[in-house]
């Protein structure tokens, strides 16, 4: 079979391959790239099917690459692209809790790079909280959303104290309740353990030192399931070293 005949054969065969199969294959390839740490490739592949699920994965991949790997000059652009993908996911399926959680994730990362004054001006605090709460409304047993809302409350109280409560309804007890709920739902989740530790240190670094250390040790003791968890594990190791040495 010469080259021309082969290309014709491929064109004919492709007619009989359902479009959904191509999308499913692309999504599986995206998940594989994500697991291996090729996050930009994962984002590109995940968008191909044009589904809410695919855009959720794309948003997550872009935000992770932006936060952990990208140079400072590229971070904001990546986080904005992550937000765009999350919003597309919501437009395609507003009942997808993962889409709302990734919107919160992307906006939260943007708030970190635009600066405190700009973040306040653009209302990031309430927009992030509202997106997480929508994810929990859709799925009250979503451990990742409880982790995120716990981190939101802890971060706001740690940064703004009494005023965070007045302005945004941030509350230490709510932070702890959401973290604890996350661990009930996912007791061996490396990310939940790590974020809980960070939240405790944000609220009261000295008073929560022992408990945070225990959570970090538990997180590090769990084998990473993918490239993202390896990144989290490294952060946990570094944070524990600082805590022990500090």
Image (cartoon, rainbow, N blue to C red):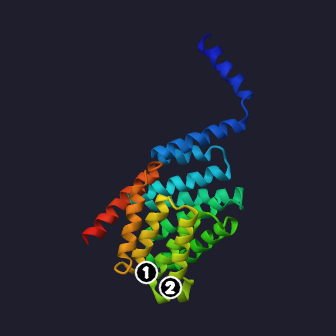
Q: Position of residue 160 (x, y in %)?
A: 45, 84
On the rendered structure, is 103 left or right of 68? right
Q: Which residue is mark 1?
A: 159
Q: Are marks 1 and 2 in contact (CB under 8 Å)?
A: yes
User: Mark 2 packing: few (<14 Cα in 10 Å), some, or many (20+)?
Assistant: some
Give the quarter of the figure containing the N terminus. top right
Report helix, strand or loop for mark 1.
helix
Against 99, is 29 above or below? above
Give the quarter of the figure containing the C terminus. bottom left
Q: Residue at x 55, y 86 (%)?
A: 167
Q: Residue at x 70, y 59 (%)?
A: 91
Q: Position of residue 17 (x, y in %)?
A: 72, 30
Residue that sits furthest to the left in the current view:
245
Report helix, strand or loop for mark 2.
helix
Q: Residue at x 28, y 68 (%)?
A: 244
On the rendered structure, is 212 left or right of 13? left
Residue 77, label in figure: none
Q: Position of residue 165 (x, y in %)?
A: 53, 86
- Foreground of the two, 170 or 38: 170
**Of callouts 1 and 2, the N-terminal one:** 1
User: Mark 1 packing: few (<14 Cα in 10 Å), some, or many (20+)?
Assistant: few
Residue that sits furthest to the top in the current view:
1
Residue 164, label in figure: 2
Using the rendered image of the protein, determine whether residue 122 is visible from the camera's viewpoint.
Answer: no
- Foreground of the two, 159 or 8: 159
């Amino acid at each position: 079979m010469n080259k021309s005949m082969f290309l014709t054969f491929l064109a004919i065969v492709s007619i009989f391959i359902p479009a959904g199969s191509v999308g499913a294959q692309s999504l599986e390839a995206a998940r594989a790239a994500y697991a291996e740490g090729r996050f930009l490739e994962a984002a590109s592949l995940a968008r191909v099917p044009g589904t809410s699920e695919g855009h959720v994965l794309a948003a997550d991949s872009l935000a992770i690459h932006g936060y952990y790997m990208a140079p400072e000059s590229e971070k904001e652009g990546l986080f904005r692209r992550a937000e765009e993908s999350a919003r597309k996911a919501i437009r395609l399926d507003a009942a997808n809790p993962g889409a709302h959680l990734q919107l919160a994730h992307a906006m939260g990362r943007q708030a970190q790079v635009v600066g405190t004054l700009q973040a306040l001006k653009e209302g990031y605090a309430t927009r992030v909280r509202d997106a997480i709460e929508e994810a929990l409304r859709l799925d009250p047993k979503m451990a990742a959303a409880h982790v995120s809302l716990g981190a939101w409350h802890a971060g706001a109280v740690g940064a703004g104290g009494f005023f965070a409560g007045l302005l945004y309804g941030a509350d230490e007890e709510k932070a702890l309740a959401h973290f604890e709920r996350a661990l009930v739902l996912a007791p061996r989740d490396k990310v939940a353990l790590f974020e809980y530790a960070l939240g405790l240190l944000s609220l009261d670094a000295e008073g929560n030192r022992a408990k945070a250390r225990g959570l970090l040790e538990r997180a590090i003791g769990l084998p990473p399931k993918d490239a993202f968890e390896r990144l989290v594990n490294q952060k946990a190791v570094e944070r524990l070293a600082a805590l022990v040495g500090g």
